[in-house]
Image: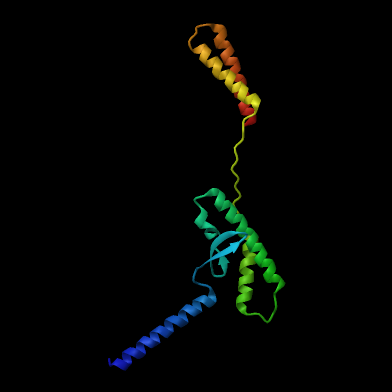
Amino acid sequence: MDLISVALASYINTVQNTVHKQMNDIYGVEAKTLVLDYAGMQVPFTYQLWKVQDKSVCATYAQNALQYSKCTVAASDMFHQICRELKQKDQPSQAWQYTKYKNMYCNAALAYKPMVAQISFVEPSSELRKAEKACNVAILEAMGSDDEALQQEQKRLCNRYRKLDKAIN
């Protein structure tokens, strides 16, 4: 092969690859990842074939339940907001991609379910705390004693504590 043939073959190969990539983009075959800033939160997600991949939404936050929850709630709100805005601006003269994006975000708004998590610490009631303390004291007193009355009192107090704990939890 002469130098001109090699250069021409290389050029044709490059053009074919470029056209092929553009064709894939038109049909949405290749997965694309976006990170949008919404409500002060970076919301990452991937879409392919003009559909948001639910498991990809906020995947970078998956190791932190509170951050992940906050992100998924923001993502759900964002999908709804984008859908509303795209529906309001809908005009028949707009490019085909507009319709694809509108459908993608509106479908995500309907289908995506955020993971809502809250972590809180519940203080036991003062009555439960008193019952637990009374049970623990009775256990200590009954441990070193053969007195039947102390052991009966320990059972009574600890049973009361267990019942309260079961009722609350």
Place residue 13 in its image quadrant.
bottom left
Residue at 65% in and 24% down? 127
Residue 52, compared with residue 65, is above or below; it is below
In the rendered image, the residue lying farthest to the top is: 147
In the rendered image, the residue lying farthest to the left is: 1
Q: Quadrant of the N terminus?
A: bottom left
Place residue 79 in its image quadrant.
bottom right
Residue 164, compared with residue 11, is above or below; it is above
Residue 122 drawn at (x, y percent): 61, 35
Residue at 49% in and 79% down? 22
Residue 63 drawn at (x, y percent): 49, 50
Residue at 43% in and 84% down? 16
Place residue 118 in its image quadrant.
top right
Is residue 112 something that shows in the picture?
no
Residue 32, compared with residue 167, is above or below; it is below
Residue 68 drawn at (x, y percent): 55, 53
In the rendered image, the residue lying farthest to the front is: 40
Q: Quadrant of the C terminus?
A: top right
Between 137 and 52, the one lying in front of the other is: 137
Q: Locate residue 21 relative to residue 9 in the image: left or right.
A: right
Residue 90 drawn at (x, y percent): 70, 75
